Image (spheres, coloured by chain):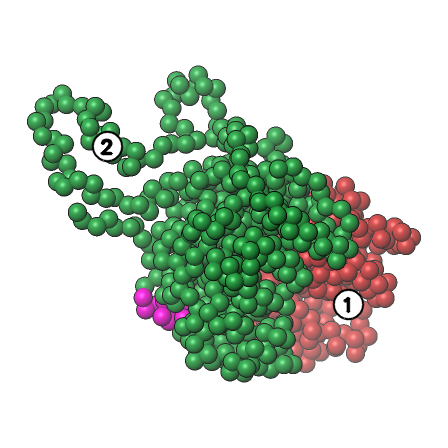
Amino acid sequence: MIKDELLRNMSEAIVGGDRVAAVALASDAVRSGADLLEVIEKGFVTGLQKVGELWEQGDYFLPELISSAEAMKAAMAVLEPELARKKIEARSGGKVVIGTVEGDIHDIGKNLVASMLQAGGFEVFDLGADVKLERFVEKAEAVGARIICLSALLTTTMTNQKRLIGLLRDRGLRDKYKVLVGGAPASRKWADEIGADGYAENAVAAVKLVRTIAGRN
Amino acid sequence: MIETKRPKLEILGGALVERIVDEGLTLLETQGVMIENAEALQLLGDAGAVVDRASQRARLGRKLVEGCLASTPSAITLYDRSGEKAFAVGGDEVHFDPGSAAVTLLDHDTQEERKAATADLVDFYKLVETLEHIHFQSTGLISSDVPAEVSDCYRLYLGLCLSSKPFVTGTFRVEGFRPMKDFLVAIRGGERELRLKPLAIFDACPSPPLKWSNLTAQSLLDAARAGIPSELISMGLTGATSPVTIAGTLVQHVAENLCGLAICQAAAKGAPVIFGGSPASFDMRKGTTPMGAIETIMIDSAYAQIGKFLKLPTHAYMGLSDAKVNDPQAGFETAMGAVLGALSGINVISGPGMLDFESSQSLEKLVIDDGICAMVYRLLAGIAQRDDPIALDVFEGFTPDMTFLSHPHTRQWYRKEHILAGLVDRDPYEAWVTAGRTSIVDKAHADVRRRLGKYDALPLADPVRKEIDKIMAAYARSSGVGRLPVWEL
């Protein structure tokens, strides 16, 4: 049983976006042989949930959000090798392939979503920006991901989100993947129109969406 | 007569200007800039920069940059298509051009953004041609019915056919420069003539932080050699792609723009360069890039002041809005930017007509904004002493029932001192009700139709038209593009 105070410190390190403290607390936990699943679920993840609430209340903005995600990733980077060594199955959200579609070099929003997903316990394969549509499919096939997230900032490039769905259909892979879309010009209506499996308007909503979709799989 | 003061805004104190420039130069020297263009790296290396080929990074010493600044002209004169009308781009001269390269048009009838087609671009050019206070054209819309391979070139081709005003434009791909330059050469009648009388400015944007892409660096090299002015469009987003503080973003702005300027000078000493930009105060909630934010306007005003300190012509994206329709936000953001940009003495102000983070154009907004520009020019003209004495003569023989309306002094000066209202509503309430409570947007729409009806710009001389048709067709062929949209003059 880990002391409540320690768990609270872990949570607070994430809420405060304090990378150094998060890493130190994670390292201490590994050294002391603490129950790492408890550390993650009752410590760090609690903090991340609190961050999501603060965002939704309008108290947190992108700098806080991204600092917390970075702190979470740093803590997980310390914990994961230890979990693997002890052959402990950590709560994994699943694998997600993400990128900005071809013709579009904008990646700020996509990076945010990737970071938040990773912090939220998903294994994220970020292909970057201006990504050829075939690469999304190749990557998803190669790593065994079931979710593909497509970003586009331009109305001229958002049509590539639609094209990817066509590409999956042509290859008989449409039912194998959940395709989620985001970016400034995208909308729920657009997602419905092109037959995507979901749309999220910001990084916090994206994590919720992916979590729901992954749960369904 | 007492000299008329031109109202002026200097947002930064002198010490801060010097400090920002100093840090910008240090940044160029210590961190350098990544340039994804082998020739630009080579030329800068030859000029004395420390170049690391592996990381494509060039570090530029102060001496090198100062030498480049010294060889850059402090003013440029653009000429219209006929080569007769001159526009000074320097000092505190102000010229507006429509915000450029919108991907959508706000459709007045549906009040929805839709993709723009060639027919829209034709209307856009014709309309801007009739707008007196928008001195330059810009290749303002991207036509969705033109294949992407030739769209940069095609929009300039169309504009030169339809409009006599100088152009602000730019390339979307490296191959686009050659035919675009060839159009300008054909109109001027030779390379030397184009150099003497530039007709178009080419925008080139570094990719923040501290990077020039292959495309944009190549545009700088090509334009410099042709004597075409390059507009340097550094565009840091505070806290996202540049430091979050305004002063910090200005340091990066100076470094990126001066690196661009050095590339131009390394390619051709004396090449014309404009110190411009499109930075924005990054929205920390929405992750968007608001052009109408007061902080964005402050950054613009400040880097323009720095550009002037460096003795360069200046440019900014101001007088535009992030609103999606022509609502109050569209009006106030546009007016704030236009007024403050003009008071800052920015030479080229790109913005009129533009909505939605530089992505949408509105014909109605162009007409409304032309009225804002008219007011701005009146403001810049300042308050003059027209008579000596100023008013004592007017009061000669004063009686309490005297009226100024019939006074010869009124007749003499009212048109010079006051501009007409244009589309702005100045009706008494009852008259406004009787006239159908028409909004400025509806009035603007009617004015757009009226102006398009009366458009009568001189067409290009036949042999020149044939030549640029040929250049366009050859470029389309070499790009593997078959048919181009049909349009009518």
Going 43% across and 72% down the picture, which residue do you hit?
A: B71
Q: Colour of chain B?
A: green
Which residue type does callout 2 highlight?
Gln
Q: Which residue is mark 1?
A: A90
Residue at position x 61%, y 30% in the image: B109
**Quarter of the image where one finds residue A52:** bottom right
Q: Amino acid at mark 1?
A: Ala
Q: Residue B395 appears at what percent x and percent y?
A: 11, 31
Q: Give me the chain that's red.
A: A
Residue B8 is a magenta residue: no
Give the chain letter at badge 1: A
Q: Is residue B248 above or below residue B425?
A: below
Chain ID of residue with mark 2 = B
- Find the distance from the CA under tag 2 to the CA under tag 1: 86 Å
Q: How many neighbours does mark 2 have within 10 angstroms: few (below 14), some (14-19), or many (20 or more)?
A: few
Residue interval drawn in magenta: B14-21
Q: Is residue B318 visible?
A: no
Q: Can you identify the residue that label 2 sits on?
A: B412
Q: Secondary structure at mark 2?
A: helix
